[in-house]
Image: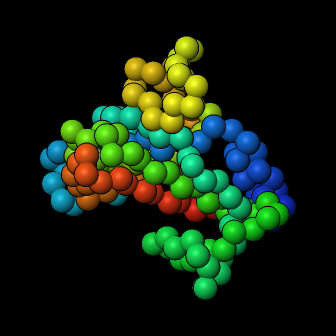
Amino acid sequence: MSVLTRSGRAAIAESIALQPIHLAWGTGDPAWGDTPPAEDVATTALLNEVGRRTAFDIAYAEPDEAGEIVTPTGRYSRSVTPTSNLYCAFRHDFGDGAEHVIRELAVFVGTVMVEGLPEGQRYFLPEQVTTPGTLLVVENSAPIHRSTATRETFEFVITF
């Protein structure tokens, strides 16, 4: 029997970190109400994508009870050397999806956008995406009512 080693897992995280990473969000199914269904590991796309935002912070992380990165599953510290944990942070601006109720989130790697978009654009509508990429992490959420008065920040630590 073979086993994927720690260094092999770190190499996977390193490979992922070199690619474009985006957080897509969508309206999901309004019938979910306030209690979304469990996520399905076979998911490859959101039900009703509204847009996606480029990660503003990507780093390697390691578990640390006193770490500055806090997620629902634990605390982490940044690592200067590659680890099997990849930290990704996304900050949506005030106007991003402001007219929607968000119920689903997904981290994608390898998204390709249409050509000719403004340099530096970080939020993309579905029609601006030519290849969605590979879905790494999906999360069904209690409804997030978007408003032009708020910015939404999402942080994930993805373990390989």
**Considering depth in this image, is 74 or 149 the residue closer to the camera?**
149
**Considering depth in this image, is 43 or 156 the residue closer to the camera?**
156
* Rendered residue at 39%/45% (across/down): 93
* Rendered residue at 82%/56% (across/down): 8
Quarter occupied by residue 96: top left
- Tell me if 46 is positioned left or right of 54 in this view: left
Identity of the residue furthest to the bottom in this view: 66
Identity of the residue furthest to the top in this view: 116
Image height of 39 relative to 20, above or below: below
Q: Position of residue 60 (x, y in %)?
A: 71, 61
Q: Position of residue 19 (x, y in %)?
A: 68, 38
- Please state, as top left, top right, bottom left or bottom right, where the N terminus lies in the image: bottom right
- Tell me if 94 is positioned left or right of 147 in this view: right
* Rendered residue at 35%/53% (across/down): 151
Q: How many marks?
A: 0
- Tell me if 20 is positioned left or right of 98 in this view: right
Q: Say whether residue 41 is visible.
A: no
- Please state, as top left, top right, bottom left or bottom right, where the C terminus lies in the image: bottom right
Image height of 62 relative to 65, above or below: above
Q: Say whether residue 81 is visible.
A: yes
Quarter occupied by residue 99: top left
Image height of 3 relative to 50, above or below: below
Q: Position of residue 43 (x, y in %)?
A: 44, 42
Image height of 6 relative to 98, above or below: below
Q: Position of residue 153 (x, y in %)?
A: 43, 57
